[in-house]
Amino acid sequence: MDFSLSEDNLTLQESARTFLEKEISLSRVLIPGTTVADANYAGNWEKIAPLGWQGLVVAEEFGGLGLSCIDLVMILGAMGRTLAPSPFLGTLFGTWAIQRAGSDVQKKRLLPAVVEGRAKLALAVAESNGSTEDNGREAVMSRRGTDCRITGVKSFVIDAASADWLVVGAMDEAAGWRRFFLVDAKQDGVQVDLLPWRDVTRQVCDVRLKDAVAEPLEMDSKALWPWLRDRILLAIAAENAEGMRHVLDITVDYAKNRVAFGRPIGTYQAIKHSLADMLGLAECSNAAALYAAWALSEDKSDAGLAAAMAKAYTSDAYVSVTQRSTQIFGAIGFTWEMKNHLYYKRARANAELFGNARAHRSRIMDMVEKKAA
Amino acid sequence: MDFELPGENHPERAAIRSWFEANPRPTGQDLAQAGYVVPHWPKPWGVAAGAELQLIIDEELKRAGVVPPRNPVAINNCAQSLLTHGTQGQSERFLLPALSGEEVWCMLFSEPSGGSDLGALRTTARREGDHYIVKGHKIWTSLAHVAKVGVLVARTQPELPKHQGLSEFLIDMDSPGITVRPIIDMSGHENEYNEVFFDEVRVPADRLLGKEGEGWSLSMTQLQTERVALSKPGAIWGHGPSARDLVEGMAEIGALSDGALREEAAQVYVEGELLRLLAYRALSDRMNARAPGPEAAIHKMLAAPHGQHVVDLAKRVQGPRGMIAGEQPFPSQLGRTGHMDDWDYAYWFSPAVTMGVGTQEILKNVVSERVLGLPRESDPTARLPWSETRQQSASKAS
């Protein structure tokens, strides 16, 4: 029994942090009026992709490292700390889907390309109201002979504008349920519109499909989605947990140095107590994310519950920590030139994507009641 | 990283289990002599158990249905100081009766002058020949009404700054001049806490623990000493009902069908589960002999308000019936033992959990200073001779 990270975990975490802190600069998005176009998505990816982090969860037979969710969380956390604008998350979500549900041929075609940095992916699953449930009808698949074609809209697709291939969830009208498909993002029938998303460190897009050629993933989508959803929830929770830890760190530094009425503001109990509360949120978030990572890696029966708890708790906590941080910085923290708002917006976006805290708490209670019954 | 607890097949388990099979109904003496009351202590008092073995012993005690001696002040906090600071004579006189539970101990620390600011205490012990004469007033003393032994912190050198002039004594609670008076708290419960008055109480000088002036460091160590245990998730300092009990109970009476209550129950539930994880991590650090992380202090800071939330939600679920003394919210949880398992009592007691063992405000200062490294709160009286600060506050008051 050892609830701590292994030496290998810590080494990976440390090297990812060091690399990203050195290589990723947010200075371009701290100029007022910037959009995600200024976030250096492509430039950052050119630096990150050679490290092979996108192959971390890919099985060794497809050229990846075949590592666990715990290792992955080390990377995601480091990216959450620096916000690291890049198509990592979208590619990760797509990779998971293909690895879990793709045919051998599909995996051989795409996974080595992902590992080598030649292919970027995105997962298009949400409806325009944000729902990722399997009853959405805004994108529909119909067959032409043996061909599958998708028409409709998918919303809030992370990293679609960078992606070469999309994994699209669409209603199979004939079968009456949702299936997941591989869609070449560069074909004529696919239009990707970048949203004027408040979190300018992340590409979030609408994807419009018109008779787009689609290739079904082999596995039954009903089996894929719960598996994929739990990992997505973990990924976001991991970003949240380390993002808020970073915000806490910079806020503590600020409170030690900023002087008002003749002493550092960190000597005032109003500030100290607020920071102590933020630490409590950050520690619980860290525990939640790591436990979920462990439970998913080990395929524990409570893994789904752990993932939902991690997403629900860290979503609220990240919003709260970034909000308090802005208040402690005072007026300067309210300006575009400071980093505070970038984290504040990331927190808000992560809280709303893939189900908000309240929705996941409702799921949690369903699971707890089921377990008790 | 591994979140599994020690398993059934752990190699050290067999020996312990067979001891309990050979001694199915052990007395406190038996358990103390076997080293199972304080397994983490060195032999002969304990078995020098690491954290993992301590957990196994706990589990095997429970499995055998054996209730270990209940003497929390001695076993959890103070008696260990005798190993490091006590005389041979003190260890021989006090340890076995303490560990076997024959002599209950109490902790005579807090005073009316301030609980969190323990260093400001006013009870004095002045040396007269081979005795100390104790005069003063202690308060919020658990178990004082049944204790045979009191661990007293008193001021022996008033001319020194507040933290330096304190000393610790092991006193007989039946000494002439000691009066114990129960405090009736808002729950109506008697003797949860007591006041203790000292009127020229004569304490033999060989009852001084350690040296004169070591009282502050001894008492700080004792307040922080915690035996490794699977931290209990109960609402009242780990005891009593937990968030899991709450959700189970609410499901049972149909309260979870109310959307607002369901949402709130979910929040409390998640918080309870995460606090469990923090406690496990603090434990695992100790089990793997790593310096403890910040989890323990943070856990205390979060667990107290969490517990209040748990009992508060249970109370609100009851509606006006919750105001009927002794009324319980969840039928299937009736008849659990331990007075903190009484939801009604736990609710009325719960305001104390953010005060006892240092107020929540002081705890947040401690967390922000020791864990986050923020500037220390300054105490203008910390470096002055204590007698001088007393004169100053007396003249201000007049």
Image: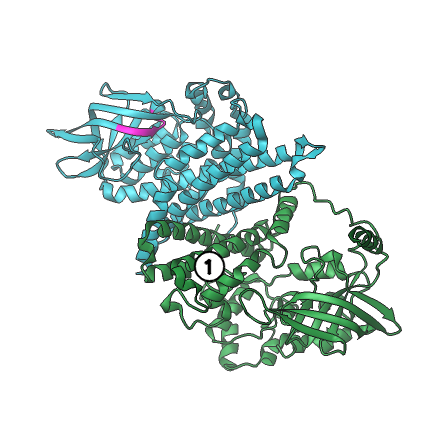
Chain colours: A cyan, B green
Describe residue B388's horizontal placement relative to residue A343 as left or right.
Answer: right
Describe residue B316's horizontal placement relative to residue B161 as left or right.
Answer: left
Q: Is residue A248 magenta?
A: no
Q: Is residue B10 visible?
A: no
* Residue pictured at 61% horizontal, 48% vertical: B364
Q: Could you tell me residue B381's position as x and y percent?
A: 78, 49
- Identified by mark 1, the residue type is Val
Task: Report the number of discs.
Answer: 1
* Residue pictured at 51% horizontal, 38% vertical: A321
* Residue pictured at 33% horizontal, 29% vertical: A157
Q: Relative to residue A270, is residue B381 depicted above or below? A: below
Q: Quadrant of residue A277?
A: top right
Closest to the observer: A13 or B110? Answer: B110
* Residue pictured at 77% horizontal, 74% vertical: B88
Residue lying at the far front in this picture: please name it. B398
Crowd rating for badge 1 (residues with CA inside 10 Å; few <14, some 14–19, many 20+): many
The stretch of residues the image draws in magenta is A154-160
Q: Quadrant of residue B210?
A: bottom right
Q: Quadrant of residue A220?
A: top left
Closest to the observer: A81 or A213? Answer: A81
Residue lying at the far right in this picture: please name it. B129
Q: Is residue B119 visible?
A: yes
Q: Could you tell me residue A95's position as x and y percent?
A: 34, 34
Q: Could you tell me residue A276's position as x and y percent?
A: 58, 44
What residue is disc 1 on? B311
